[in-house]
Image: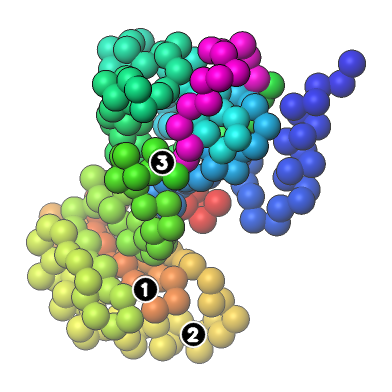
Amino acid sequence: MSDTSTIANKLAALLSEHEIYVGGARIISQSGGPTPLAALLNEIDATVLERTLVFSIDDVTVSMIVAGRRLRGLIDVSGNLPEAESVIGNVLSRDEPETLQAAGDLMMLLCASASQVTVRSLPSQPFGTSAEAGISASGLAKLWHIDLDAKPVALIERFLAAHSNDMTAYLYVSNGDVAKTVGDVAMLDALWSTQIATFRKRHRSVLPQNEGPRLICLNEPLGENTTVAVAIDGNDVGLFSYKPSQMPKIVSAWTLALG
């Protein structure tokens, strides 16, 4: 007998040009875009028939029973988190506000700084009774103050924010204006003001067809064993300094951010 879940996942992958799979699970949020909890609730909102949705939120796995675009309840959370004890196995209901709030607190805790969220759709498991419908995704969004239609954070801004710990400082520029700075950016600001515009002009002349997102690591040191890289996506530019030892990690993170 064939594995219908595997077949369904393969068909879903063939039907979408933009969905990315890793280890058989579909990536729904990466480097904060879209926001992890909004992405999770949107998956619930898209589920009509009763299913077990298994979300991997970084290194924590959360299994939920979902039906009719409603979250009925959580059936398992890996890692023996104490915050999950009062939630697992209980049907969510507005008549049980404490459990509902505990579920929200747990999900916000797990999703607050998640760098990647994936989902698998598996057959449903026995849970509660047919009369216990759970809470709609839109209802959860209102209760937990989540904007399901929030505009995704720009790629460069997400990348800088998600990996700031690997950088000594960064400067984020959107449409020509400095939108955010972190750390001591005096040297970066000088580079942006005097050299980056010229660099981008020359880069376009050499590679006129290379208009997609790109990361350019420069060899020029800034002193104190730091160097500089430029991340570009259209009119968004990230200029950041980092220790040379962090280069493999940063390049790997950039590749992951691009999917």
Describe the colour scheme in one phrase.
rainbow
Callout 3: SS = helix
| Amino acid type, callout 2 | Arg
Which residue, given by chain and number where applicable, does mark 2 sit on? 204
Callout 1: SS = strand
Which one is in front, 138 or 225? Answer: 138
Q: Nearer the viewer, mark 1 or mark 2?
A: 1
Image point (26%, 62%), residue name: 240
Q: Nearer the viewer, mark 2 or mark 3?
A: 3
First-in-chain label (2 vs 3): 3
Which one is in front, 17 or 244? Answer: 17
| Amino acid type, callout 3 | Gly
Which one is in front, 97 or 183? Answer: 97
Image coordinates for residue 45, horizontal then vertical, percent:
54, 42
Circle 2/circle 3 CB separation < 8 Å: no
Q: Is residue 165 above or below residue 186?
A: above
Image coordinates for residue 147, horizontal then vertical, percent:
36, 52
**Residue 131 lies within the magenta run:** yes
Q: CA distance from mark 2 to mark 3?
A: 48 Å
Image point (65%, 37%), residue name: 48
